[in-house]
Amino acid sequence: MLIILDRDGVINEYDGNYICSAEEWHPIPGSIDAVARLCNAGHRIAIATNQSGIARGYYDTDELDAMHDKMAQLVEAAGGHIDFIAYCPHHPDDQCDCRKPLTGLLRQIRGHFHISALTGAIMVGDSRKDLEAGAAEGCQPILVRTGNGLDTERHLEARPIADTRVFDNLAQVADWVIGAGL
């Protein structure tokens, strides 16, 4: 199964401020192991992340690559592998088609894996944008309470997204996916 993860607030710590360097990038406890466990259970992992800090001039693509290299090395050291990373470098006002909640990043992921649909895939995020993008492409939306997740959960009560499952963190998502034999 393909599992698509948002990055900030799902894999790494996120408090609402931009993460601008590999030195500032810190994994959420248990998230790296969760990715490795999912890989070892036979799942493919892709990342779909909005990174408007590039358009805002807070960091450049070399620094983003350094953050992603750090993440990938940690996952590989734990015995896992990230198959593909799709990111949107645009400003929210740029009106691109890749910034979540639009589905351009997920279409990039489909193209990378040479699949016509994401039906049956899982999209894990901490924001409504993540869940909406995943649902629009037929993914099972999963909200984690890390990052912006607690605020998102409160807002989902008023405006739910169908079939959204909620877990405390990525480690619990991995427990559920592996335990359910998905």
Image (tube, rainbow, N blue to C red):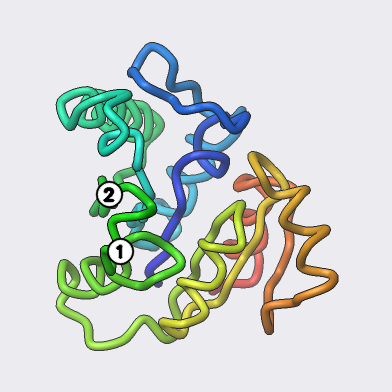
The picture quadrant where one finds residue 177 is bottom right
Q: Which type of secondary structure does the marked residue at label 2 adopt? A: loop
Q: Which residue is mark 2?
A: 90
Residue at x-position 26% and y-position 50%: 85
Mark carried by residue 95: 1
Q: Residue 152 versus residue 111: which sits nearer the camera?
A: 152
Q: Is residue 39 left or right of residue 55?
A: right
How many numbered discs sit on the rendered protein? 2
Q: Is residue 85 above or below residue 76?
A: below
- Percent position of residue 180, x then y: 64, 71
Amino acid at pointer 2: His
- Percent position of residue 123, x then y: 49, 66
Q: CA distance from mark 2 to mark 1?
A: 8 Å
Residue at x-position 55% and y-position 77%: 140
- Percent position of residue 35, x then y: 46, 45
Q: Which quadrant does the C terminus fall into?
A: bottom right
Q: Label 2: few (<14), some or many (≥20) within 10 Å?
A: some
Residue at x-position 34% and y-position 18%: 21
Amino acid at pointer 1: Gln
The picture quadrant where one finds residue 30 is top right
Q: Is residue 135 left or right of residue 59?
A: right
Q: Residue 84 versus residue 61: which sits nearer the camera?
A: 61
Residue at x-position 23% and y-position 88%: 116
The answer to whether mark 2 and mark 1 are in CB contact below 8 A is no
